[in-house]
């Protein structure tokens, strides 16, 4: 048990940092829902990007701290088992931390998507668009997306499609006329948080984080938002750095050459004595 306690004590900062970042990501999701339900987020000019920037700064900083901590262990003569364990722990911590950020990004992206979809069909109901709707019909169906990721099926926010009445489930997308009719309902009555999507979305984010750091790239989940793309790049580079450090430790290239370099070869010393 003593080696385990020593390992946990040495890497307590990595564990604490990962836990705090994950708590912040999940907490911001709950805070977003609370502000929406309380009526403080109705409108299209909500400073949600500021929340994203806070996480964007805190997560990479904590990540780099974990990496530098591992490098410090290698340069201060820590045991090789402790070094390798710290590298593996940092690797897992990076996966968990970024999965939390992707989870938060999914929530913000789905909220923006539901709001944009509502505004789009609301605009189609205006007198200026009536002639175009009659002429083009289904061709005006909204196809753009502002979601953070493509490929994560459950949406964390229910939108206008869930408010369509008289259209059976499993029958595909409702007609554009029904979507326009649903947009007559007030925005705060249309968009609501989907609690059932929390676990599936987080598991998808955890999977995507693992795929990203290993540079597997199956292509089933694709980042669409600019912040998501930035974090994907940071995580990929961090994974490469941690793997390189792990290989160097395993081959004896880090943290093991100081004492041998200081001591002269035994044959050379014997030659001088003669």
Image (cartoon, helix red, strand yellow):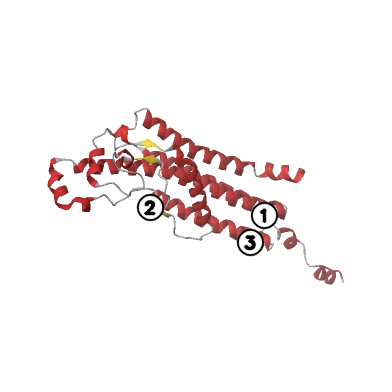
Q: Which mark is residue 247?
A: 3
Q: Which of marks 3 and 2 is in front?
A: 2
Q: Can residue 109 be seen in this view?
A: yes
Residue 124 lies in quadrant = top left
Asked if the residue at tag 2 contacts the one at tag 1, i.e. Cβ–Cβ closer than 8 Å, the answer is: no
Asked if the residue at tag 2 contacts the one at tag 3, i.e. Cβ–Cβ closer than 8 Å, the answer is: no
> Could you say whether the residue bearing mark 1 is in a helix, strand or loop?
helix
Q: Which residue is painted at 46% across and 53% down in the image?
A: 232
Tell which circle, 1 or 3, labels the residue nearer the N-terminal end: 1
Q: Residue 224 carries which label?
A: 2
Residue 33 % position (x, y) = 41, 33
Residue 112 lies in quadrant = top left
- Mark 2 is surrounded, within 10 Å at the Cα level, by few (under 14), some (14 to 19) or many (20 or more) other residues, namely some
Per the model, the C-alpha gap separating discs 1 and 2 is: 35 Å
Q: So how many labels did they put on this image? A: 3
> Could you say whether the residue bearing mark 2 is in a helix, strand or loop?
loop
Residue 79 % position (x, y) = 73, 53
Residue 270 % position (x, y) = 85, 69
- Mark 3 is surrounded, within 10 Å at the Cα level, by few (under 14), some (14 to 19) or many (20 or more) other residues, namely some
**Residue assigned mark 1:** 84
Q: Which residue lies furthest to the right in this view?
A: 274
Per the model, the C-alpha gap separating discs 3 and 2 is: 33 Å
Which quarter of the image is occupied by the C terminus?
bottom right
Q: Can residue 75 be seen in this view?
A: no
Residue 49 % position (x, y) = 37, 41
Q: Residue 71 carries which label?
A: none
Q: Nearer the viewer, mark 1 or mark 2?
A: 2
Tell which circle, 3 or 2, labels the residue nearer the N-terminal end: 2
Of 188 and 58, nearer the camera is 188
> Could you say whether the residue bearing mark 3 is in a helix, strand or loop?
helix
Question: In screen coordinates, is 31 left or right of 242?
Answer: left
């Amino acid at each position: 048990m003593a080696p385990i306690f020593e390992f946990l004590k040495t890497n307590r900062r990595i564990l604490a940092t990962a836990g705090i970042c994950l708590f912040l990501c999940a907490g911001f999701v709950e805070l977003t829902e609370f502000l929406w339900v309380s009526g403080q987020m109705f409108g299209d000019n909500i400073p949600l990007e500021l929340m994203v920037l806070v996480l964007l700064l805190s997560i990479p900083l904590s990540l780099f701290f974990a990496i530098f901590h591992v490098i410090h262990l290698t340069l201060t003569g820590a045991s090789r088992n402790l070094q390798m364990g710290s590298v593996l722990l940092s690797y897992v911590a990076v996966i968990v931390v970024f999965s939390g950020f992707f989870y938060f990004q999914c929530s913000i992206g789905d909220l923006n998507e539901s709001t944009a979809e509502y505004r789009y069909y609301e605009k189609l109901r205006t007198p200026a668009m009536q002639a175009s709707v009659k002429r083009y019909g289904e061709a005006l169906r909204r196809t753009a997306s502002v979601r953070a990721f493509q490929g994560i099926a459950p949406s964390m926010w229910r939108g206008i499609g869930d408010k369509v009445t008289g259209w059976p489930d499993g029958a595909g997308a409702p007609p554009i006329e029904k979507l326009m009719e649903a947009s007559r309902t007030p925005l705060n009555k249309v968009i609501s948080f989907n609690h059932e999507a929390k676990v599936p979305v987080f598991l998808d984010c955890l999977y995507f984080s693992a795929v990203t750091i290993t540079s597997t790239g199956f292509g089933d989940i694709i980042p669409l938002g600019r912040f998501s793309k930035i974090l994907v790049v940071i995580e990929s580079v961090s994974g490469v750095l941690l793997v390189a450090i792990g290989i160097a430790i395993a081959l004896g290239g880090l943290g093991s050459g100081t004492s041998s370099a200081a001591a002269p070869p035994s044959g050379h010393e014997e030659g001088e004595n003669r």
